Structure formats: structure tokens, C-alpha cells
Image (cartoon, helix red, strand yellow):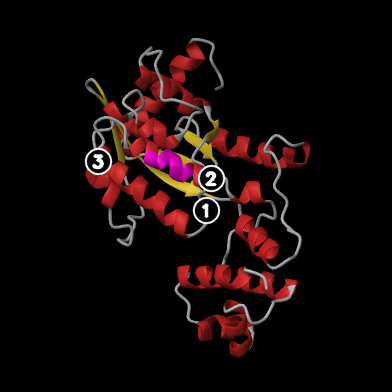
Amino acid sequence: MSDVGPLLKHWRNARRLSQLALSTEAAVSLRHLCFVETGRANPSRAMVLRLAEVLDVPLRERNALLLSAGFAPVYQESELDAPELAAVRGALETILRQQEPFPALVVDRSWDIRHTNAAAVRFFDLLRGGRTTAPPGPANVLRRMFHPDGVRPHVANWQEVAEALVRRVRREAIGGVTDERAQRILEEVLSYPGVPASLRSLDTSAPLLPIVPIRYALGERRFDYFSTVTTLGTPQDVTLQELRIECFFPVDDETRAAAHELAGSDVHNGRTGP
């Protein structure tokens, strides 16, 4: 028998649905759903896809469900630089440019930074202040926020931001968004010097705040931002579904003016892009 039943039960529990609620919404017999979850019946390909749709299972995990039921995956996973994603890359670049002169990033499921706009390069170069040391590995939001050589020394409300990030990574792991690499990176950054041990035992069931301001400080200068996260709607490609666009917006006029000033200095120095 296939092992798709326990996986479907996992997703049903993760979405906090009873068997009755799922069977009703998916128009599947309660008896048959029970047999599928316990391994007494094998679901059809169409049923797996229908249950996955109702449970809002990420595309990568839908492929895993199909494989566990003995069917071929149906969702493609492309490289971001693949020719067929040229239109998507153009759309992402447009969004990043439109966010100028405020920072914007494109991150993947492992929290690696895949693209940035010129404002993000300007701002994080300013915080680096000419330092040649950097967090290990590819540019990654978690490492950048937690590592002593990242932005951590310049985040005035670092504890608040760190708690929100940890909760978000762990909550997304339950929802099937992040991967094992993201979990390994989280464990890595929680072991960095100066990171409080209390972050390891956070209550991930607590409600996430819709907006967590990030207050940066560099000497006497202050930069207060909040961020929004955008995902691509109804993607049919695993890679695209897992991309997130994080745009930073100024909280006050001082931050807004500082961003315009940094942009002006780049133009004056002949720098116009990342």
C-alpha cells in the first residue's frame, strides 16, 4: 500500500481540519477519506490533487504526495535563470525598481537573497561601513540578521525582530514552505555568539504580528522601516511559488529623506544599479 495516507493526515492536522470538514469541502466520502488516511484504500491521482488543493498544500509537497501515491509529479521546478522564466524575471526587476529609493529583496524558500534593488545595495553597504568580513555562505536573510558581522549590531530592536523571524521560519516549516536547509540555517544562526538561548524555546503558536518595524542605527543616524512580503499569485512552477518579494517602507520622514539622500549620492557618484 502507498504511504500517501499519513501525509494527507499530516496536512489535514496542519490545517486544523477534521475528516468530516475535509471530506465535505473536497466532496469526498468520509468513509473513503478515512480508508485513504489509514492505508486501507489508494486514492486516485485526481483525488490526491483535489485534497491537496483544499488543504492548500504547497506545490513541492503536492509533488511529494503524488509520488507517495505512485503517480508522477505534475508541477515543474525551474531554475530562476531558465529562459522560460524570462517574463517572470522581468516582472521581478520591475517591482524592485518601482520600490526605489527604498530597499527591496527577492528571497527563496531557504531565505537566500536571489535579487535586490539598488536601494538595498546602497543601504546594506552603508551599514557594512567598508568591513570586509561577512556572514558565511551565500547572502541569506537569517545569517545577515543573526551573525555578528551582519546587520545585527545596527538593529536597535534586534530581539523583537529576531523573535519574529524565528517564529516565522518555524511556522512556515509547519506549513511546508521552508526546506530542510532553512531549518539547518536557523539552527546555525541560533548558535551564533550573543544570540539568547531563549530564542530556541519560543512559543510558535503565538499569533504573528502583521508588521514588525525594523529600527536601524548607524552612529547618530536612524533608519526606521517596516516591510511587506509579496508572493506570486497562482503559480504553476515550484520555484515561483517559493519566491517572496520583501519591500521596505519608511516609517517616518527622517528615514524617507535619508533614502532619497543615499539615492542622490549614488547618482552623483555614477552608480545607478545594484
Identified at 38% across, 36% down, the residue is: 188
Question: Does residue 123 appear left or right of residue 240 in this picture?
Answer: left
Asked whether the residues under the numbered discs 1 and 2 touch, taking CB atoms below 8 Å apart as contact, a structural biologist would say yes
Give the number of the disc on residue 159. Answer: 3
Task: Give amino acid for label 3.
Answer: Gln
Identified at 24% across, 41% down, the residue is: 159
Helix, strand or loop at label 3? It is helix
From what the image shows, is residue 44 above or below residue 258?
A: below
Taking the magenta stretch, the answer to whether it contains residue 274 is: no
| Residue that mark 2 sits on | 109
Identified at 35% across, 52% down, the residue is: 167
From what the image shows, is residue 213 above or below residue 41?
A: above
| Residue that mark 1 sits on | 177
Foreground pick, 265 / 123:
123
Segment tinted magenta in the rendering:
182-187
Magenta residues, dominant SS class? helix
Helix, strand or loop at label 1? It is loop
Identified at 68% across, 73% down, the residue is: 1
- Residue 58, position in %: x, y? 59, 59
